[in-house]
Image (cartoon, rainbow, N blue to C red):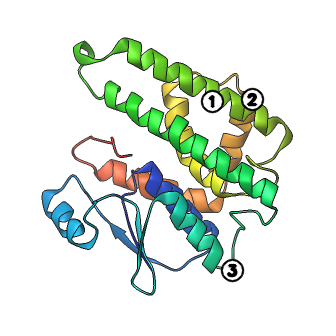
Amino acid sequence: MELFYHPLSRYSQKVLLGLYEKQVNFFPRVTELRDPIQRQAFSKIYPPCKLPLLKCADGSLLPESTIIIEYLDLHVPGGSQLLPRDRAECLRVRLWDRIIDNDISNQLFLLEQQLGMAPEHRNELAMAQVKQRLLQVLAGIDDELADSHWLVGDGFTLADCALVPCLEPAFELLSLLDLENLCRYRQQAKLRGAWELVAEEAALAAAEDVTGLKLIP
C-alpha cells in the first residue's frame, strides 16, 4: 500500500496514526499540494487533489481519512482494533469521529485561517464564535473522558485517531487547562508509540517548512 499525505495535515496525521496502530507496512508518499509541480503530478493520480489518499495493494484508491481507517481495520487483522466489534460501541466511535472532524478539526482550521491573516483583516466576531463552539465540544469530551481511559472505553479507536492530532493546536489556541480529564488524555496520548512517530515527522516537516504556512486541513 502507498499513502499520499502531508505530515502537517491533521487528516493525514489521523490516517498515519491508524496505520501505525495497525502496524501496517506502507510506502509513504509525502505530497506538497502547495507546490504547483507536485499538485499537477498528484492530480493525474487523483483529480480531486485531496489528501490523504491510500493506494491499496490492488491499485484501487481510497480517499477520506475515516474510510481509509475503516478499510485498514477490516483488512488488517493485527494491531489495535480501531472499530469495536460491539455494534453499540462501534456506533459511538463513529459518532465521535464525525463530531471531532466536523466540530473540532474543521473549526480549528477556520480559526488558524483567521490567525494567519493580518490583524486588521481578521473577523474577531467569527473567531470568538468558533472558539466558543470548540470549547463546548471539548468540554463535552472532557465529560466523556471522566469514565473512560480513551474516548470510547478502554481501547484506542478511530475516534482517538481523529482526536489526538487536534489536541496540541487546541491547547495552543484555547484555554483548556481546567479540563482535567482532557489534560490527562493529552498526556497519555503523547506517550503512545504510534503518536510519537506521527508527531516526530510533523515536527521535522514544520522545521523544514520555509513558507511558514501550516494551514493544511
- The numbered dot on residue 92 is none
Looking at the figure, which quarter contains the N terminus?
Answer: bottom left
- Please provide percent x and percent y for residue 11: 46, 53
Q: Is residue 38 above or below residue 187?
A: below
List the residue tagged with mark 3.
77
- Whether pointer 1 and pointer 2 mark residues with C-beta atoms closer than 8 Å, the reply is no
At 40% from the left edge and 51% from the top edge, which residue is drawn?
9
List the residue tagged with mark 2.
180
Q: CA distance from mark 2 to mark 3?
A: 35 Å
List the residue tagged with mark 1.
137
Is label 2 or label 3 in front?
3
- Whether pointer 2 and pointer 3 mark residues with C-beta atoms closer than 8 Å, the reply is no
- Please provide percent x and percent y for residue 81: 72, 67
At 60% from the left edge and 62% from the top edge, which residue is drawn?
194
- As drawn, is 9 to the left or to the right of 135? left
Q: Quadrant of residue 54?
A: bottom left
- As drawn, is 113 to the left or to the right of 88? left
